[in-house]
Image (cartoon, grey):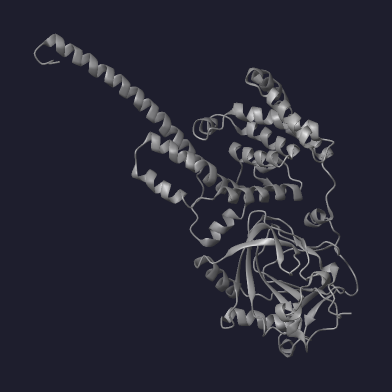
Amino acid sequence: MIYSTSVMSMVKLFEMEESLKTILDIYVQEMQSKLDLIKLYRDSLKRETWTTLQEKEEYVSNPLNAFPLLRRLNQDWPKWLRYIKLAIASKKAKEMEVQLKSAPIDDDLKIALKGMTRIEKFHNLHAEDLTKGVLMGKKLNSHLTAPDCVALADYYYNQTQFSGSTHWYRMALRLHTHPHGMIYAKVLGLKRKRIYKKYAKALLKESLTLDKTKPTPTEKSEWNRLAKEVTREDNYDNVKKLIDEYLSGDEKIFQEVAARQKRKPTKLERGCRGEWPRKSSPELICRYNRDTSAFLKLAPLKLEFLSVQPMILLYHDVLYENEFKSMRDIAMYNDSMIDGWTYVDFDKKGNPKQQDRVVKIISFQGTTAPFTLSINRRLADMSGLEMRENMVLYLTNYGLGGHFGKHVDYVELAKRPPDFFADFGGDRIATAVFYASDVPLGGTTVFTKLKIAVQPKKGNALIWFNLNHAGEPDPLTEHSVCPVVLGSRWIISKWIHERQQVFKKPCLA
C-alpha cells in the first residue's frame, strides 16, 4: 500500500507507530524487570575482594561459603546463562558459557553434600543455626539460601534419611521470601509450591519410618503411593494450609523434638566433639628429646608422650613454614594434586580399598629437593628410624567436611600377600604426620580405642608405631580424622616401612 499519496493514509502510519511504541514500552518494562532480577542476584553475591591466596583459601575454608559456591556453579549459573542469553544478546554470555564448561560436575556436588551432612551429623548441628551462619557456636559472616537448603534436603531424602530432610525443607520455605523468591522461581525454577510438596512427602515418610531402620520394597512402594496421594494437585491448598500452620511454630520446638529422636553419639563422634577427658599418667610427660640421634644432643626437640603402649609421640615446632610453602607452591601451580580416598580395608592382594574421595594429595618422590631432605632428616632424628631407602613424602589438603574413617595403617597378618616383605618393603612400622596448618574447628586425629584426640597445630608432628617389638600389628593404633569443619587442613605424612629398619628396629615392649 502507498501511504504518501494521502493524508488520511498517513494517519494509519501514525496509529501504526503508536502501536509499535506501546509494544516497545512493554518490551522496555520486561527488559527492566529482567535487568532488575539480574542486578538483585548480582547484589546477593557481593563479598569483599580477596587478592592473596591466603585470603581466598580462608574464605573457602568456611563450609558455609564453600558449599553454596560449589552448588551455585553447578546448579544456578547454567540457569542464569540461559536466562541472560534469552534476555540479552551479548558476547559476554559466550564468555560465561566457556567458563562454565569447567564448573563443578554433579559428582563434585554430591561429595560436597556428603561433607556438609557429615559436619552436621558429627557435631549435632541444627539446620537453622547453619542457615544463619552459626557453626558450632561461632557466628560467621556467611549464610545459606533457600536453594542451598533444598539441595541438602534432597540429598537426605534421596538417601531415605527423611528425618534429616524435613529440617532443611522447612528452612528452605522460611528463606524462600520476597524479593529473592522471585529469583528462585523465575530463573532457578524453584517455586514455593514445589518445596511445599517436597516437604509434605518428607514429613509423611518421616512419620512412617520413625520406628524402622530400613523399609522393605513393599513398604517403600506403598509409601511412594501415599506420598503421591498427599501431594495431588487438587489437594495442594489443604497441604499448604497444614504446612503453614506447622511453620508458625517456634523453630526451637522442632529442634527439641529432633533431639529426642536422635541416636546416641558413637565413640568416634564423642572424640570429634572433644568429649573425651585428657589422659593423665606419670609416663605421659613432656620433655626435650636428646636421645634418638647425635644431632639432637646439640639441638633437642620438644616432645610430648601421648601413649606408651602403643608408642604415640607428639613433637612441637618441628616444621618450618618455608618447607611447607615450597611443597604447596609446587602442588598449587603445577595443578598436580590428585583425589585421595579414605582407606578402610585391604583386599587379598594387600591393596587398599577405596571409599570416599575426601582430599587432594601429591607425593614427593625425589631425594634432591631441599625440603624433602630436611624433613626426612628431621624425622629420622625424631623417630630413631632409617629413612634413606624411602624418602617419599605426601602432601595432603582436606576438602569440605573432609575426613578419614576408622582404619589402621598396617596390613593384617591374614591379608598379607605372598612375598609381602620383598614386594612392599614389609609392613608400615610407623606413621608420621606433620601438621602444616592450624584448623580452628574439626580435623582432629583420634585414636578411638585409646580415646586420644590430637588437634592439628601448625608446626607439630605426630608419630606412632603401628607394630610392636615383635613386628606384629597393634590394633590399638586404629585411628581416624574427624571432619574438617572450619579451616584448611594441610598435612605432610609418611609411612616408614620395616625393611629399612633391619638394624634400627626399636624395642617398644
Quadrant in the picture for the C terminus: bottom right
Q: Residue furthest front?
A: 418
**In the displayed image of the protein, which residue is found farthest to the top?**
8
Q: Answer yes or no: is residue 385 visible.
A: no
- Could you tell me if residue 103 is visible in this image? yes
Badge count: 0
130, above or below 423, in the image: above
Left/right placement of residue 417 relative to residue 393 reads right
Write down the quadrant of residue 146 in the picture: top right
Residue 356, by quadrant, is bottom right
Work out whether residue 403 or residue 444 is closer to the camera in this orientation and state it.
403
Q: Where is residue 476 drawn, in percent x and y?
A: 85, 67
Residue that appears at 39% across and 34% down: 87
- Give the image location of residue 200, x and y in percent: 70, 28
Q: Position of residue 470 (x, y in %)?
A: 86, 80
Q: Residue at x 65, y 39 (%)?
A: 154
Q: Is residue 484 above or below residue 409?
A: above
Q: Nearer the viewer, residue 159 or 284?
A: 159
Camera-nearest residue between 136 and 12: 12
Q: Residue furthest right?
A: 282
Percent x, y of residue 260: 84, 38
Instruction: For the N terminus, give its image quadrant.
Output: top left
Is residue 425 depicted above or below 52 in this figure? Answer: below
